[in-house]
Each structure stands twice: as C-alpha cells, then as structure tokens.
Amino acid sequence: MKITSDVEISDIKKARLLLKSVTQTNPKHPPGWIAAARLEEVAGKLQAARQLIQKGCEECPKNEDVWIEACRLASPDEAKAVIARGVKSIPNSVKLWMQAAKLEHDELNKSRVLRKGLENIPDSVRLWKAVVELANEEDARLLLHRAVECCPLHVELWLALARLETYDNAKKVLNKAREKLPKEPAIWITAAKLEEANGNTSMVGKIIERGIRALQREGVVIDREVWMKEAEAAERAGSVATCQAIIRNTIGVGVEEEDRKRTWVADAEECKKRGSIETARAIYAHALTVFLTKKSIWLKAAQLEKSYGTRESLDALLRKAVTYRPQAEVLWLMGAKEKWLAGDVPAARAILQEAYAAIPNSEEIWLAAFKLEFENHEPERARMLLAKARERGGTERVWMKSAMVERELGNTEEERRLLDEGLKRFPSFFKLWLMLSQLEERMNNLEKAKDACESGLKHCPNCIPLWQSLARLEENIDGISKARAVLTIARKKNPQNPELWLAAVRAELRHGNKKEADVLMAKALQECPKSGILWAASIEMASRPQRKSKSADAHKNCSHDPHVLTAVAKLFWQDRKVDKARTWLNKAVTLAPDIGDFWALYYKFELQHGDDDKQKDVLKRCVAAEPKHGEKWQAIAKAVENSHDPTEAILRKVVIALGREEAENNRQ
C-alpha cells in the first residue's frame, strides 16, 4: 500500500495510537502485537515492525503465530535464528518445525530439521509425511515403519508403507493396520488392489466381500455413494477388478427392491458422464445378473459398449442379450447392424437367420434382412425376401419396399402392379399413392400422376405431401392459378399448417409475384406464429435492411427453432461474422441432427471459412448423426441413382446443390 495523502497518514497515526494502547494494556494478547507490527510494515517502517514483533515474542513466548510473524518480518539471515528461538520456546509446535524446515534450502538440512521435530513430537502425522516425502524409497520404508508405531491410528501412513513393501510384507502391514483400525474401509480396498496388482484377481472379490462384512460387524454404515466414489477412484488407478468387486458388493445397499432398476441405470449414466466407463460397465453387469430379461438394460449396456468398448465386447454382450431375450427384435437388429458395419455381411445374414427362427413373424427382421441384401447389391435376394414377406401377409411397409426394389431395377410394370395391389390392401397409406404419382410423373403421364394424387387425397385428406405434390403438378400443367386453388382447399382442410402456407408463398415467388407472396407470408405468420420454417423463410424474403428486425422477431417467437437459427447464421455469414455464424450453425445441427440440410449448410460454410480439421469434424459428426430429413437432403438421398450412396457422398451432393441454388438466386 502506497501512502499518498494526509488523510492516510492521519489514519495510520490513529491506528498506531490504538494499537499502542492494546499492547500496553494487554501485553499478553498476541494479535495486538501482530497487528501493530503489520501496521508499521504497511507504513514502510520495517525496522520498527521488527522491534515490535520482537517485543511480542518476549511477551508471548508460547504463541506460534507471533513467532511465525517474527520469522516473516525478519531478514533472511536472521529468520533461522528467530525460528530457532521459537522452537526452543514451544518445542511441540508442528507449525514452527514446518516453518523451520521451509527456511532450509537443501533437502538434507530440511530432513534434519524435521527429524529433530519428530524427536519432540513423535506423534505428528504432518511431520512424518513431510520427512517421508524427502526420503528415498529405502529410507522412506524405514521411516514409515517407525511412523506407524508412533501414529498407529493414521491410515494414510499404513497405506503408504504397504505401497513401499514387497507383496508378502505389504500383506502383513495391511493385516496389522486392520487390527489397529478395524473400521477403516481404505485398508480393505488397498488389500484388494494389492491382490489385483499381483495377478490374484480371484481374491479381489472375496477380500471386498469379507471387508464389507467385517466393517458391518464393527458397526460401520456402508454408504453406497461413498463406495461408488471409491470404485471410480479404483478405476482411475487402473484397478478394474477392484472397481467391479466394490460395485458388485455395494450397489444394492439401501436401495428398495422396486427402485433398483431405475436407480442403477441412473448411477451408470452418471458414471458414464463423468468418464468412469468401467464403473458404469460394472453397474450394468450387476444389474443384468438381477434383471436378466430387461430389454432396456441390455440396450443401455449395448450402447455403452458401442460408444466405449470394442466390436468384440459389443458382439459378446449382444450374443448374451439375445439368449436371455430372444423376443427382443432390437437386440438382434443391433447385432446384425454392427456386423454389417464391420464389413462382415455373411455374419450379419447369419444373425438375422437366427432372429427369424426366434421371432418368425417379425416384420422388422424381414425388413432388416431385405435392407442388408438391398444395400449390398443383392437385389434378387432382396426380392425373394420381400416376396416371402408379402405371402405371409406383410404390412404396407413391405409393399412399399417391394415397389422400391422394382423401381431401382427399372421394372416399371412390376412396380406399378405392386403399387396397385398394395393400394387395394392399404388405401390409406399415403406413401404408396405418392410413389404411384412419382412413377407416372417419371413416365411423363402428368394427368395420371395428378389422378393418383387426387385418389390418394380422397383416402388421406390430411396428408400434406400429397397436397404439395398435387399443387406442383397443377402448376406444371395449368399454371399458378390452378395451384393456388389446390393450396387454398388444402389449407381449409388442414388449418394452421406451416408447410402448406410455405408452399403457397414459394409458388408465388416462382412466378415473380413478390407482393402476393408477402401478403401470404403475413397471413401465414398470423395463423402459425410459432412456426420456425415460416419465420426462416420470411427472413430470407425480407429486403437487406429489414432482415435484422425480422430475425429479432423470429428469435423472440421461436428462439430454439433450428430453422430460425440457420436463417440467422446465414445473415452472420453474409456479414462476414464468421465466429458467430459458426456458433449458430453448430446450435442448429445440435438441436436437429436428423435434418441433413443444416449439416450441408454447415459443411459448405466450413469449406469456405474453416480449416481442414473443422471440415473433417463436421463431416464426421454428420456421418455419425445419419440424417434422414430435410427438403434438399431427401430430394437427393431418395433419387434412384443415389439410393446406395453413403451419408458422406449425399452431404457433398447437397452442398453442390446449395451452391447451384445460391448462384441462381444471385443471378436473379
């Protein structure tokens, strides 16, 4: 503190008078002397401060704090002499001996001071620890032998000694420690770790089990939270078997029977979040011994293996799962998918054949087998599977997939036959009507395509894709006025539907009717004020100066909508605010990882402004998310020529399409 003004000087004078009065009226009060010395130090009178604290030491020779303050204020040469006097006055003060050791510069002298201290205070754990830390391994072991004799009730010293001893001696040390401290769990845990480190894994579980019984006999309460932390600590130390044994023996303590499943799953998920994977694995392993047939726990355990285990460990777990839960389709499908991803198609096929045997009428398994063959370019096998599924009275999905195979193989007549037959059986399944309409459109029979949509709408008047398809066909055949009429009827039958409003707005924009589009958009936002797709479109339609206020309104109405986040990110991108644009795009893909359009936009942005690592990261995250939705994404992914393309290839194609669209808009 620098003293600059008269006020501060007068404050110091006042304080000096007050403290003088304290030290004179009560000279045996240590804080008075310390405060007086510190005041002089602040005032810059170090000599006066030293003299005052010297007096304090004479008046209060049995107070540690006064001696430590005197040592702090003394010059480096005198400090040792001061602390030596202090230690003489209070030979059993650990604080002063530690301070004396701190003043020494080489380790030998430090050790000498600490040993001297231990002669006076043999039961000080702090001094023992400090002296052991300075010693080499051999000396440390001898010191710890003496330390546990002097402080037999301090568990840390016993454990430190056990760590330094050979295997046989360590066992003896821990047994002695157990006699002295029968209520100390750490000794049992260390004993288990010792056995594990020496390869006696079979002993680990027995030791933990015996330990818990012994502790309970001593009246120790087994707190499962505390033991779980011990298990996580054992995992971090690399003692996996000890971690598993602790979980096995303590995870059920104090948990009601009906709460076990919920509690254990929650515990495992918490451990997973903290990165304690082995502990989570052990919890699931134990839960599965109790709940052998619970599909949800098998699935959670499989997810854990998928994220953190090896392909082999996941395969082994799923094999075990389907022996206990042969009726759980999802477990069979997961096993088959993992084999397929590993490139082992015959093994995936074999798993699905086993699954048929276990669940003969499962449509999911039929369709998974179809997908496996279809994606691996075995259309004939895929066809046969679907034909069998249809014979067994398959549902609408089987007919849809059958038509898809024929579409890919270019068998138009067979595709039409299957669609007609499927529609006779399932007239209210809109996807078959859409496929029939698309088939006629590909064959250039626009009127027939329109008829298919109209027939479909009789059966499914609430199907938005059919209305959109019909409006587009009308626009192509008879122009905008007919499309307008269709969309108006659609909105009457399906009020408050943002997709229909958006289709109407876009139709007007395609024909250059900007005013009509604006009027429609205003009405749309009145009817659907919380629609993200409408707000995002209105931001893009606004003129440059209005976009900022428009995006503020959009954010106010639906702040967590990924479409709005993407539209705002585009504005930042245009204004070259690269970091902000990146943050908003990242938010959008985190909120809606299933929408491929956002990933494509994010990837395009990184291609323009990011480095190689950022581009790879977006690509990797997109492939992991396996997006299935998004206007542009679906248009490209569902095109016949792209039906076998991996996610990465589709992402790149969508980026190219976005680039073309941007160039088109700029030209206009």
Image (cartoon, rainbow, N blue to C red):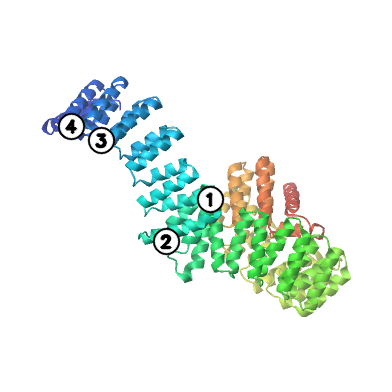
> Cα distance, mark 1 to mark 3?
42 Å
Going by the numbered disc 2, the residue's amino acid type is: Arg
Mark 2 surroundings: few (<14), some (14-19) or many (≥20) residues within 10 A: some
> Cα distance, mark 1 to mark 4?
55 Å
268 or 593: nearer the eye?
268
N-terminal of the pair, mark 1 or mark 2, is 1
> Cα distance, mark 1 to mark 2?
20 Å
Going by the numbered disc 1, the residue's amino acid type is: Glu
**Residue 526: where, in percent of width, then height?**
57, 64
On the rendered structure, is 328 left or right of 62? Answer: right
Residue at label 4? 60
Residue at label 2? 213
N-terminal of the pair, mark 3 or mark 4, is 4
Mark 3 surroundings: few (<14), some (14-19) or many (≥20) residues within 10 A: some
**Residue 19: where, in percent of width, then height?**
17, 31
Going by the numbered disc 3, the residue's amino acid type is: Asn
Nearer mark to the viewer, of 1 and 3:
1
In contact (CB < 8 Å): disc 4 and disc 2: no
Report the disc number at residue 104.
Answer: none
**Residue 460: where, in percent of width, then height?**
71, 75
Residue at label 3? 92
N-terminal of the pair, mark 4 or mark 2, is 4
**Residue 332: where, in percent of width, then height?**
69, 66
